[in-house]
Amino acid sequence: MKLTGNTVFITGGGSGIGRGLAEALHKLGNKVIISGRRKGHLAATIKANSGMQSVELDVAHPASIAAVAKKLIADYPELNVLINNAGIMQIDDAAGAVDEAVLVPTVMTNLLGPIRMTSALIDHLKKQASATVINVSSGLAFTPLAMTAVYCATKAAMHSYTLSQRYKLKGSSVTVLELAPPWVQTDLLGGKSDPRAMPLQEFIDETMTLLATNATEILVEGVKMLRNNVGPDEGAFLTQFNDRLAQSPH
Ligand SMILES: NC(=O)c1ccc[n+]([C@@H]2O[C@H](COP(=O)([O-])OP(=O)(O)OC[C@H]3O[C@@H](n4cnc5c(N)ncnc54)[C@H](OP(=O)(O)O)[C@@H]3O)[C@@H](O)[C@H]2O)c1
């Protein structure tokens, strides 16, 4: 995609990968609007990046999405890039009774959220000469981490939805990309200082290089093992992957 001259709206831009992408795009001179629930994180991010804007948003609530979409279209008529990045990850137990307190918020945030957010902006995006939707899935969409089964299922569903969106928008001005990160050092599931995870800035730098190409799946080197696993031998690889991650890094 073209990485300059855009007006970018990103969900969950006050921390982690979202903040990293927002700052990288801001540095390239794009107009960037970040969003999320925690006012303090939004305020700190826009304070550190002069000219960046923010709006409070809860993607788990349709009314919040509708209100923010209306405001975005009114305040930023040139908006042409949507990055569906907001997400949550919690440990669950696929071998036991489902915990509604994990199931419902995870599906609402990670699956219904990005579908509704795109739905609220798609007519506007189609009117732009060139527009991009970036859905942030995960390497775990392709090789699930069994201790976060619901999370992985939402990401697999987003991969599927992205394929359908891309197919249906073929020939329109809207390009649909999927960004599937590997394990990256952020607050997600407390992995910020885990040495097995990829340092955030390295991930952002490699991602920005890939975003500048025509690739529709943005896959840093470190995630290809998970992405390319899908196939008839999926079960054996999945066991190996889960066994290895269950071991302590130290
Ligand atoms: N880090 C990894 O290893 C990794 C790997 C693969 C994929 N990913 C994906 O990358 C994306 C970003 O995660 P991250 O690693 O950067 O973790 P993070 O720092 O925890 O960021 C998640 C962001 O999502 C926002 N968010 C969560 N629930 C929201 C809601 N209901 N409404 C609006 N915003 C919400 C959070 O902001 P508020 O809490 O302020 O709302 C936060 O800024 C997620 O989709 C995640 O699944 C991460």
Image: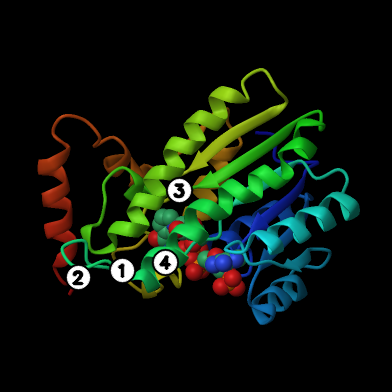
Instruction: Please report contact status of discs 1 and 4: CB closer than 8 Å, yes or no.
Output: no
Residue position for label 4: 185
Quadrant assignment for the C terminus? bottom left
- Residue appearing at x 13%, y 41% in the figure: 235
Label 4 CB, ligand 1: below 8 Å?
yes
What amino acid type should be assigned to the residue bearing mark 4? Gln
* Residue carrying label 3: 137
Please provide percent x and percent y for residue 33: 75, 59
Q: Nearer the viewer, residue 231 or 156?
A: 156
Label 2: which residue?
249
Q: Residue at x 21, y 61 (%)?
A: 94
For the residues carrying marks 1 and 4, which lies nearer the camera in this image? 4
x and y percentages locating residue 51 in the rendered image: 84, 64
Q: Kindly indicate whether the residue at mark 1 contacts the one at mark 3 (C-beta within 8 angstroms).
A: no
On the rendered image, what quadrant is the N terminus found in? top right
At numbered mark 2, what does the secondary structure look like: helix, strand or loop? loop
The alpha-carbon separation of the residues under discs 1 and 2 comes to 7 Å
- Mark 1, residue position: 195
Disc 3 marks a residue whose amino acid type is Ser
Q: Distance between the residues labelled 1 and 4?
A: 8 Å
Question: How far apart in space, not on screen, are marks 2 and 4 (Cα)?
Answer: 14 Å
Q: What residue type is labelled 1?
A: Pro
Q: Mark 1 or mark 4, which has the lower sequence index?
A: 4
SS for dot 3: loop
- Could you tell me the amino acid type at mark 2? Pro
User: Local crowd at mark 3 within 10 Å, few (<14), some, or many (≥20)?
Assistant: many
